[in-house]
Image: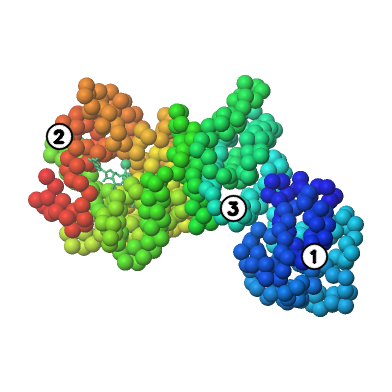
Amino acid sequence: MKIGETEARVGRGRRRILVVEDEWINREILNLMLERDYDVVFAETGAQALDILGEQFRTLSLVLLDLNLPDMKGIDILRTIKGTQRTALLPVIVMTADQDSEVECLSLGATDFISKPYPKQEIVLARILRTIELFEDRDLIRWTEHDPLTGLLNRAFFYRYAAQYDALHPEGATDAVLLNINRFHMINERYGREFGDEVLKRVAQELTAAFEGTDGIVCRREDDTFLIYCPHRVDYRDVLDRVCVQMDRDYQVRARIGVYSCADRGIDVERRFDRAKQAADTVKNSFSHAIGVYDNAMHEKALYAEQLLEQFHTAIREKQFSVFFQPKFDIRPDKPVLNSAEALVRWNHPTLGMISPGIFIPLFEENGLIRELDSYVWRETAEHIRDWRDRFGKRVSVSVNVSRIDLGDPPLLKKLEDIVEETGIEHGQLLLEITESAYTDDAERIREVVEALREAGFFIEMDDFGTGYSSLNMITSLPIDALKLDMQFIRTAFRDGKDTRLIEAVIGLAQSLGLTTIAEGVETAEQMLTLKALGCDIVQGYYFSKPVPAAQFEAFLLPQGGE
Ligand code: C2E
Ligand code: MG
Ligand code: MG
């Protein structure tokens, strides 16, 4: 690499060199040689040098060390740098007129020498650059500094420069900002990758220009996500407007921004950008807002979520999760009879009280913990089924929820088979509820998994039907046994000016496909009777019972129970 490229290579995060030199004239000469390419800090004494190293070691890329200082020997400073863990990896070039000390310096870890009087500027710069690069290559061997497509800093260097920025500006507020292009995968699909690349380059250019002349740094984190770390500002609308350029082919870039304002320096840089991402996610599906700001409520929510995640394993160990059962009634006979139940997990937290699955299930789905929780729930459920058979002589079927994450888990079938075998229940007693939207995620693969479960003898209920946009065509060919109408169907149909035509149509469809229909969220006698009249088979909801603990559910199994 040519010397003149140094600055371009570093971009706006300029490297910083500590020059330890007591003579004024030498400092002047070095400053002239270096200032174009580097930020230079000077120490005139050994004590000053150690102070700067102690406080600013993170920001330094190199030390140029004079061996003759008024207050201490340069050799001792070198020894301290190399003997201190946090500075040991900092390269040191020794400047000396005395060749005799070279061997000692090398043995102490000096990387190179620059003789005095100084050689030509090109030589000094070349040695410095080579040394810095060697050291950076060593600890960042896998990374190059820039994203090849956009020329922006890449993620690793960006985080490094952001930390450096903090060290250099201990005062002053900074913002962590994340920008994401809306529906970028569609752009690729619709106009081709090449055009997608053009969009990314253009956005990168606009962002660079937007932060030109400020201390802000910009990077492309991956795909269509850009990060900005910059001094605090109140508004980012101008940045957004800039980026939303009109490209040719009548396509206009649309983006959303998440801002974590006045970021807390106490947490590491990556986590600050996680918060910016959370803020951006709040405006993901919004038509009216494109800028989300990380606020206190989100912070509280994130802390709460973190706490729940952290405590998951303790909770499993201490059996804080319990399974509740909500009966499902067959409403075809004159008098409704118990058909089965749905197992619904509850977290009885020692300090937070009863937590609803609506809160923790999505959280556990995000990081895969749901697999462990679901296995636990399935096993507990199977054990209850077995227990009820033993104590009441009743064959009860219970449906369990199977998360979309479970479906991506290859040993799923084996897990379920083991549970059935070890508890001694029948396959048909464990009904599997799979949410409709799982089928639309990756239809082909899900179909295969579900087919295999069904062949093994499990019954499959499609949960939350009506919320997942599956096509009619898909429904007709899916391997399922029952359609479970989402609660929203019932809510909508029984609002003021009752209109049950949609429910009627869905029940008709289910019947024509030979599927059982289950309605959930049924709260009133009117709803139950209307559903019965429309031909719905099974009903679940507060009208009959809320989900209750196993012991309470047993009342439904006794001869007088049920109604
Ligand atoms: P879901 O499977 O659709 O379960 C039905 C939800 O509706 C349950 O909420 C139930 O308590 C509630 N519900 C039942 N009848 C009525 C009613 O008449 N009125 C009203 N307002 N609500 C009613 P819950 O127990 O809070 O569960 C919420 C969701 O959490 C479930 O929706 C399911 O998707 C998920 N979930 C619950 N337990 C598990 C589990 O063990 N594993 C997995 N993967 N997901 C679970
Ligand atoms: Mg369910
Ligand atoms: Mg449901």
Q: Residue at the spot x=70%, y=62% of the render? A: 139
Measure how far apart labels 2 and 1 are at the Cα level. Answer: 95 Å
Where in the figure is residue 473, as x and y percent of width and height?
45, 30
Choose between 500 and 134: the one closer to the eye: 134
The circle on residue 183 is none
Residue that badge 3 annotates: 169
Residue that badge 2 annotates: 525
Indicate whether 330 appears above or below 59: above
Q: Secondary structure at mark 1?
A: loop
Where in the figure is residue 247, as x and y percent of width and height?
65, 25
User: Where is the C terminus found, in terms of image quarters?
Assistant: top left
- Mark 1 against mark 3, which lies toward the viewer? 1
Q: Residue at the spot x=27%, y=62% of the render? A: 350
Indicate whether 371 appears above or below 206: below
Choose between 561 and 59: the one closer to the eye: 59
Does any portion of residue 483 appear in the rendered image? no
